[in-house]
Image (tube, helix red, strand yellow):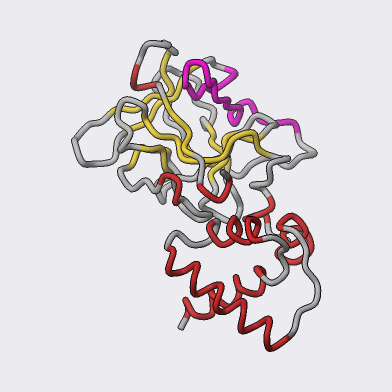
């Protein structure tokens, strides 16, 4: 019952979006499965037939005027320079994710190109200089919690507002040349450590070394942003 209602809700949005490519992007940002996409399209057609909706707008118009939720708005290309899952280059089956307690870890539950909004492994680098996780409606920022020592853990915390100066504890960047995620103020890099095979791994900030495989990450973009 809940899933059926969800199809209808997304279907209403599809009817307000112009262009098949934009509609595809929207549906794939919500659902992983092709079967779900078919169900949404069916629901959209039924709603359109019943209401005969005459207006069509693009994806951005829908996000701004209809949905009006940061859960979608904050992933705009104007706000972010990079969105996707951060996979270890040496152990690509592992990617960075957020535990329920808010700690950043490595997980085997990665979705790659099929990642959708709401997944705990979907992250975004803001042009302002923050690393944001898209698994919650409030979009928490990566944060060192004031611990600037070697080996410090990384967690998530509410981001500062646009009017506030960015906290140094939330200032991260991705360097494509070295594939490293760096905490800018301390110049330390995000490093993974697998304690037990087949289990989630630990993540900490360590002295940056360009040849250290545990510090190398590749960003896999979701297919709805390709």
Q: Is residue 34 above or below residue 44?
A: above
In the image, 121: left or right of 140? Answer: left
Query: Residue 72 location, x and y as percent?
Result: 64, 55
Identify which residue, 66 or 203, lies in the foreground.
Answer: 66
- Residue at 44%, 51% (x, y): give it: 114
The question of residue 180 being in magenta is answered with yes
Residue 58 in percent (x, y) is at 75, 59
Q: Up-down: is 212 above or below 4?
A: above
| Marker count (numbered) | 0
> Which corner quadrant holds the C terminus?
top right
Q: Residue at the location (62% across, 79% down)?
A: 45
The x, y position of residue 68, in whole percent, is 73, 61
| Direction bottom: furthest residue | 50
Left/right placement of residue 216 relative to residue 124 reads left
In magenta segment, residue 145: no
**Quadrant in the rendering for residue 54:** bottom right
Left or right: 53 in relation to 84: right
Vertical order, 117 against 49 (above or below): above
The residue under the point 46% across, 50% down is 115
Q: Position of residue 140 (x, y in %)?
A: 57, 45
In the orientation shown, which residue stands out farthest toward the front? 20
Q: Residue at x 37, y 46 (%)?
A: 110
Please give the range of residues in magenta.
165-185
Q: Is residue 83 above or below residue 178?
A: below
């Amino acid at each position: 019952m809940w899933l059926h209602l969800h199809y209808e809700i997304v279907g209403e949005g599809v009817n307000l979006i112009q262009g098949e490519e934009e509609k595809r992007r929207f549906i794939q940002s919500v659902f992983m499965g092709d079967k779900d996409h078919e169900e949404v399209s069916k629901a959209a057609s039924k709603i359109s037939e019943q209401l005969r909706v005459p207006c069509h707008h693009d994806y951005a118009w829908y996000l701004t005027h209809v949905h009006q939720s940061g859960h979608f708005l904050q992933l705009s290309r104007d706000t972010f320079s990079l969105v996707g899952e951060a996979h270890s280059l040496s152990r690509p089956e592992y990617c960075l994710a957020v535990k329920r307690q808010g700690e950043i870890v490595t997980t085997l539950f990665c979705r790659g190109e099929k990642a959708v909004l709401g997944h705990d492994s979907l992250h975004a680098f803001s042009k302002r200089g923050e690393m944001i996780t898209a698994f919650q409606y409030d979009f928490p920022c990566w944060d060192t919690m004031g611990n600037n020592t070697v080996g410090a853990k990384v967690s998530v915390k509410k981001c500062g507002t646009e009017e506030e100066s960015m906290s140094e504890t939330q200032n991260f960047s991705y360097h494509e040349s070295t594939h490293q995620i760096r905490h800018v103020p301390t110049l330390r890099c995000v490093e993974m450590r697998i304690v037990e095979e087949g289990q989630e791994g630990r993540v900490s900030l360590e002295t940056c070394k360009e040849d250290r495989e545990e510090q190398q990450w590749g960003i896999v973009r979701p297919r709805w942003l390709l």
